[in-house]
Image: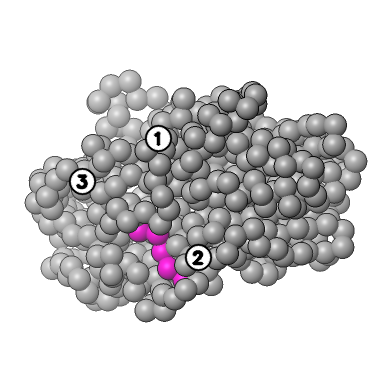
């Protein structure tokens, strides 16, 4: 997005409610809690048991759904979606949930993730006569389900899911049922909870807290849940494989008040900061974190080091999302509008600047410059994750390897480019130990493909990166 400070974006967040008269309002609040996962489009589909209604648009959830528009969405069940629109993927048609209608009823589909074999499946579908209306991977699944329409819906969904590869958490809804599915490796987070007699589904547990719902459990890898008026039923569409939840969910994407795989994100990030200090101590006067996702790690680093944590960087939360930067000079000014160094804290001090990750290096260079312009005598950059050297094919817009600073430069070259006095990254082993505390097992592990190049699924030769869709 223009003017964004960070170099990473997650594709989306999904939320749904089944069996509550205020389902649309609750879904609105749930999506608001997930706004950090996608800020360029939002949509909600509701059902009253007989009819389904869709409403969506570009922008933040509060911009897309003023109160009168929200009031028009009546029904006891709803699914919602917030998205980060990837390059070339900003059309209205791609805003989710996608709504499909047929003589046998409607189907709303919301998806978090990316399918590595979507290109091949689209070619097969088109060769068989399908006409695709969007460039979204999500539509592929709907076509696969419809082609198995002679089967009961849960079996048709299972058959469709068995044909796709990659990372996905799906939330689907018909007029009177809701379906939730997680890919066989559990790469993307998805959980269920309850509010009275109603069931809730969310990409992150923080949204349950916002609406007063109680977290029940995570949706397991390879599991399909069917929710209707009789309750909830669990089936398997795939045998579970070792869970490889995306490690960047812990590092950056998820809110610190969320729990992933039973582990609090804030606590995991603090442990990352402590591990980072154990691996890469620095002689300094203050520790500061880059707001917001790096603050927990910075606190952990400070606690482990004994160096005081200070608010050396302040984020301006009232700068518009679409700040236009037509020149390099204005781009630099844009960073200053979004982030400011606190001169009274950093002036004359040796500063440890903790950040969660470095993608291209441009943001880190600007932040180091801000600190030094504010009088910091030294800036020691400490990154609470390993170097990102490989693109992600599972729904995160890490760049091609040619644009990743860590893929093309030595540590010393990176230090010179961003203008830091020293720079260090957390090791892969340190990251895993901080997250899982030595408890990796058949059901617990993390995807570290962007750090190691070890992808947990097959990567097809024509796999399209999520930010390169036409």
- Residue 462: mark: 1
Label 3: few (<14), some (14–19) or many (≥20) C-alpha neighbours in 10 Å: some
Mark 1 vs mark 2, CA separation in Å: 25 Å
> Is 445 contained in the magenta span?
yes
User: SS for tag 2?
Assistant: loop
Q: Which residues are magenta?
A: 444-448
Label 1: few (<14), some (14–19) or many (≥20) C-alpha neighbours in 10 Å: few
Identify the image quadrant of residue 277: bottom left
Please name the residue shown 55% across and 65% down the image. Answer: 240
Please name the residue shown 53% across and 29% down the image. Answer: 123
Identify the image quadrant of residue 404: top left
Identify the image quadrant of residue 111: top right
Considering only order in the chain, which callout, 3 or 1, is on the residue closer to the N terminus?
A: 3
User: SS for tag 3?
Assistant: helix
Mark 1 vs mark 3, CA separation in Å: 22 Å
Q: Determine which residue is flagged by label 2.
A: 241
Residue 228 location, x and y as percent?
A: 83, 57
Residue 301 location, x and y as percent?
A: 28, 69
Q: Which of the two marks, 1 or 3, is nearer to us in this view?
A: 1
């Amino acid at each position: 997005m223009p003017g964004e400070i960070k170099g990473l974006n997650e594709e989306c967040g999904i939320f749904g409610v089944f069996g509550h008269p205020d389902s649309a309002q609750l879904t609105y609040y749930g999506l608001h809690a997930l706004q950090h996962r996608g800020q360029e489009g939002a949509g909600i589909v509701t059902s009253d048991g007989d009819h389904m209604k869709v409403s969506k648009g570009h922008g933040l959830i509060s911009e897309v759904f003023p109160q009168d528009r929200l009031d028009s969405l009546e029904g006891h069940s709803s699914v919602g979606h917030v998205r980060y629109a990837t390059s070339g993927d900003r059309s209205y048609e791609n805003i989710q949930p996608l709504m499909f209608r047929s003589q046998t009823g409607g189907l709303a589909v919301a998806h978090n993730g990316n399918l590595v074999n979507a290109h091949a499946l689209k070619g097969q579908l088109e060769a068989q006569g399908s006409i695709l209306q969007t460039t979204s991977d999500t539509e592929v699944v709907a076509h696969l389900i419809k082609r198995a329409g002679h089967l009961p819906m849960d079996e048709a969904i299972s058959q469709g899911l068995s044909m796709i590869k990659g990372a996905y958490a799906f939330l689907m809804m018909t007029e009177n049922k809701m379906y939730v599915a997680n890919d066989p490796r559990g790469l993307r987070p998805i959980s269920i909870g309850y509010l009275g007699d109603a069931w809730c589904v969310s990409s992150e547990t923080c949204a349950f807290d916002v609406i007063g719902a109680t977290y029940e459990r995570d949706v397991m890898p390879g599991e399909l849940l069917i929710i209707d008026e009789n309750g909830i039923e669990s089936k398997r569409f795939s045998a579970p494989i070792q869970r490889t939840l995306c490690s960047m969910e812990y590092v950056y994407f998820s809110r610190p008040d969320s729990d992933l795989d039973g582990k609090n994100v804030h606590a995991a990030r603090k442990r990352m900061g402590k591990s980072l200090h154990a691996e890469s101590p620095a002689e300094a006067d203050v520790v500061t974190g880059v707001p917001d996702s790096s603050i927990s790690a910075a606190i952990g680093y400070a606690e482990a080091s004994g160096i005081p944590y200070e608010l050396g960087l302040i984020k301006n939360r009232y700068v518009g999302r679409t700040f236009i930067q037509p020149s390099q000079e204005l781009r630099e000014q844009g960073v200053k509008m979004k982030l400011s160094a606190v001169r009274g804290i950093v002036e004359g001090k040796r500063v440890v600047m903790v950040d969660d990750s470095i993608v291209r290096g441009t943001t880190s260079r600007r932040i180091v410059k801000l600190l030094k312009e504010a009088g910091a005598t030294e800036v020691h950059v400490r990154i609470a994750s390993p170097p990102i050297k490989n693109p992600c094919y599972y729904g995160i817009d890490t760049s091609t390897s040619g644009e990743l600073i860590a893929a093309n430069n030595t540590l010393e070259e990176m230090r010179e480019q961003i203008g830091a006095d020293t720079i260090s990254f957390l090791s892969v082993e340190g990251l895993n130990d901080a997250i899982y505390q030595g408890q990796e097992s058949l059901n617990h592990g993390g995807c570290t493909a962007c750090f190691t190049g070890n992808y947990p699924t097959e990567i097809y030769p024509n796999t399209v990166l999520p930010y390169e869709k036409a």
